Amino acid sequence: MSDPESTVVVIGGGLSGALFGLKLSRARPDLRVVVVESGRRLGRGLAYGACTPRHLLNVPATRMELGLTPSFIDWLAARPDLTVEALEESGGDLAAAFLPRAVFGTYLQERLDEARAVSDGPGFVALRGRASAIMTGVRRGVRLEDGRSVLAAAVVLAIGNLPPQPPGGPDGWFYDTALFTPDPWAPDAFADLDPAAPILLVGTGLTMVDVALKLTDEGHTGPMLAVSRRGLAPLSHKAGGAWPPFLQDMLGASPLALSRRVRAEVAAADAQGVPWQRVFDAARPAVSGIWSRWSHRQRSQFLRHLRARWDIHRHRTAPRIATALGELTRRGQLEIQGARLGGYAVEGDRVTVTLAPRGGGRRTFTAARVINCTGPASDLRRLALPLIEDLKVRGLAQPDALGLGLETQDCALVQPDGAVSSWLFGLGPVTRPAWWEITATPEIVVQIDRLVARFAEGQGAAPRPARGLTGSAFLDLGAGI
């Protein structure tokens, strides 16, 4: 029987949870680190599990290093059959190559499988199940839906990206019909879909790109219309050039002032023949410090007015993904438009959607399926997830006022009364209110290493107390992202 005082439970076995469990077990071999995951494989999650060979990493291989042995680059070098197309695109530079997500998933899963323990003692352990509640008091730990429980001294929430919520707007009844696909990554998302049928994609971000390419790879030939309020699609990575950091002296500036500075730097870079991508890379190390200093009002202004444009420049696609998407639009199979949803009218196996295009006017589009591509949900004030509801009701966690996730201080959950937990923690997207950009692998690795270090410096299975975040926690995150 394992000792609860030497046990840490991690809820979620995607990249964040599985990598944290692996690294903590190596840093503290005296602990039993239990990763609770309902899926069959650790480390995959949606990003590296629900993907096709066409779905590529959004950063080059060198930015996917996890601090493991062998490194991702060394592992790839020994498997040249996996890198042929990526090397053609990168001119033979493996570090700059954009690999399929599934390839990275295989690399990570191998490292996890090597480390997993099968005994009841210390080590890195996978537990197949779904957490339903947190146990408090004398018997701390996690209760599973199947009735089992795991006693532990500390619990880490690493629940990853949540399924998207319905787009909202008028005629909410439509989202309960079979003509609406609420989650494009569900196993039956495209069941019974005529390959020649017209499709409406709600959302124009990275999820839309993935879905459009997945459908065409599977033989879909029908027209696709992708809509969002601004109609902005992700931009592409581009190699070459360099630009120095430039925002460190503007940590207290307003969103408008920072936007003007970035535009000025882009213009200066362009005049010198440097791609604008290097300007955004150079801005990246200062983003966390800026976000942490903004008031609630300033954060709200950024999210409302600037986030969409920031996202398409910051979260970019691999060049050959941009080429494939461009080909879809050039041949007329995919159209991207800025428009608001106006309403739905169902007639048999079709729905006519009324749209209010950006700039005025009215448009209708008749589709056989409306697919929700709005991206992961994050507003935990509205979502009724059993585990999160349990934390909220018992005053163990507090969703933030902007609907980004849970309030944390250096990963420790913050309660509604402002108290910082000494045993409940968060990792990955759920901690976005404090970290802002915490969805890409480089940021997540920094966060994981920081929390592992706290456990390594603590006593028993309790980490040292949380500290405030500083810009130094994010150094060297800019290049290549």
Image (spheres, grey):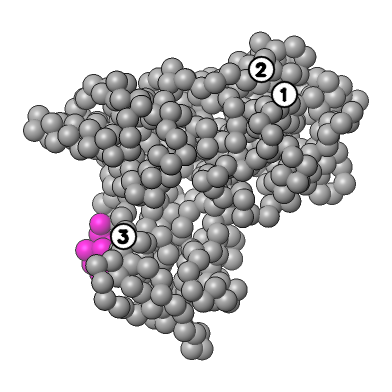
Q: Secondary structure at mark 1?
A: strand
Q: Secondary structure at mark 2?
A: loop
Q: Secondary structure at mark 3?
A: loop
Image location of residue 189, percent across then percent down: 55, 65
Image location of residue 421, percent across then percent down: 70, 27
Which residue is at 26% across, 72% downward?
Answer: 360
Q: Which residues are magenta?
A: 326-334
Image location of residue 274, percent across then percent down: 15, 31
Q: What is the CA distance from the residue labelled 2 to the residue labelled 1?
A: 7 Å
- Which residue position is annotated with label 3? 231
Question: Residue 332: within the magenta?
Answer: yes
- Which residue position is annotated with label 2? 465
Q: Based on the displayed image, in which of its 4 quarters is residue 21 positioned? A: top right
Mark 1 is surrounded, within 10 Å at the Cα level, by few (under 14), some (14 to 19) or many (20 or more) other residues, namely: some
Mark 3 is surrounded, within 10 Å at the Cα level, by few (under 14), some (14 to 19) or many (20 or more) other residues, namely: some
Q: Earlier in the sequence, mark 3 or mark 1?
A: 3
Q: Earlier in the sequence, mark 2 or mark 3?
A: 3
Q: Residue furthest bottom?
A: 348
Q: Is residue 193 left or right of residue 331?
A: right
Q: Are marks 2 and 1 in contact (CB under 8 Å)?
A: yes
